[in-house]
Image (cartoon, rainbow, N blue to C red):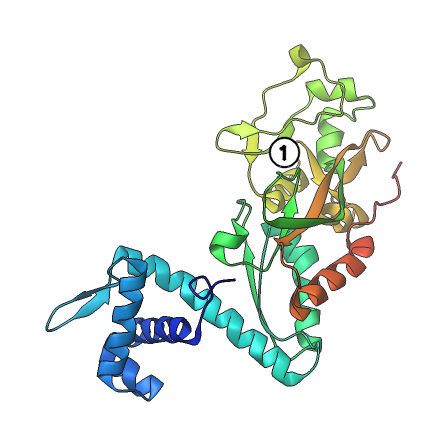
Amino acid sequence: MSTNDAYTPDRLSGISAFVAAADAGSFSGAAQRLHLTRSAVAKRVGRLETRLGVRLFHRTTRSQHLTDEGQSFYQRCTKVLAELSEAESELSAGSQTPMGRLRVTMPVQVGRQCIAPVLLALARAHPQLRLEMAFSDRRVDLIEEGYDLAVRSGRLDDTPGLKARPLGEQTMMLCAAPAYLAEHGTPHTSADLGAHERLMYGRNGNFYEWPALAMPRDTRRAPRFVLDDLVTLREAAEQALGIACLPHWLVVQSLDRGRLVQLLPHHYAPATPLHLVWPDTRHPSPKLRAAIDALMSAASTLLAAPPRRS
């Protein structure tokens, strides 16, 4: 690697001065934090701007604030400096103990019920681990948004720069409340479902069909309820509003307590896969390896297929 391509100490000092100036809101404030003179900070930032070919700060006699380019560069630089700090801490500790900030994103409901308890137990076992969990059903850009790990439901896209590992599958089952069945009858074949009220999962005006169940399209009643929240979908089923297709981990207690009854136990809908996804790095950090290992170890219990109910 040539000297021009390498991050020499001078380059890193320029980045450190820039981040400190952005955090402090002035070169004077940055100088106090870095134990330098104001002039030294200004020179380092100036050399950085010259090298990048962009202006990072708007400067007047009374104020100083980041340009659009400066704001974008600042976000990247803070991530890099945080990673360097964590790397130094891990090396100086002389161990492979999970430590530092671990940012994980996951779907809302499976995250709350299945994933978060495992990660919280991991954090309890490792006091130097700082945990940030984001619950969202949108597909997060791990690299752009700075996440260490994601749990993703459904089919994976072939995204460069990411690694993935199957975590397990969510077994889906048809359920309805006893009161609904008492009023509308119990379907005994998949074709019978066409005459029933279906509670569907969907968003943005679209809903997801139950593809494994043989229901002629001309017999399918248009769904009255389309919800984008699984817990609310389960509650609608418990209130005898129709039949829902839900993951077993979400309904197992409702089945055990008699609030819901499993229908067509030998006609499961296709299982929905779950994957762990993380940025591809040559040497995964101890915190990332610990999180992956903990989730893989717990997956067989969290996502185990239930016995078929009659």
Element carrying mark 1: loop
- The residue singled out by tag 1 in the image is 241
Q: Judge the density around disc 1: few (<14), some (14-19), many (≥20) Cα neighbours within 10 Å.
A: some
Residue 67 visible at all = yes
| Residue at screen point 49% across, 29% down | 205
User: Residue 188 location, x and y as percent?
Assistant: 83, 23
Q: Is residue 24 left or right of residue 76?
A: left
Q: Does residue 128 show up?
A: no
Nearer to the camera, 299 or 6: 6
Q: In this view, does 160 lie to the left or right of 30?
A: right
Residue 203: x %, y % from top left? 52, 34
Residue at the top extreme? 218
Image coords of residue 72 (percent x, y)? 35, 57
Query: Can you say whether 237 is above or below 36 in the image?
Result: above
Determine which quarter of the picture holds residue 35: bottom left
Q: Which residue is drawn at 52% across and 48% down?
A: 140
Q: Quadrant of residue 220?
A: top right
Q: In the image shown, does 70 or 263 lie closer to the viewer? A: 70
Of the residues shown, which amino acid type is indicated by label 1? Answer: Leu
Query: In front: 259, or 225?
Result: 225
Q: Where is residue 82 in the image (x, y as percent from the top left)?
A: 49, 71
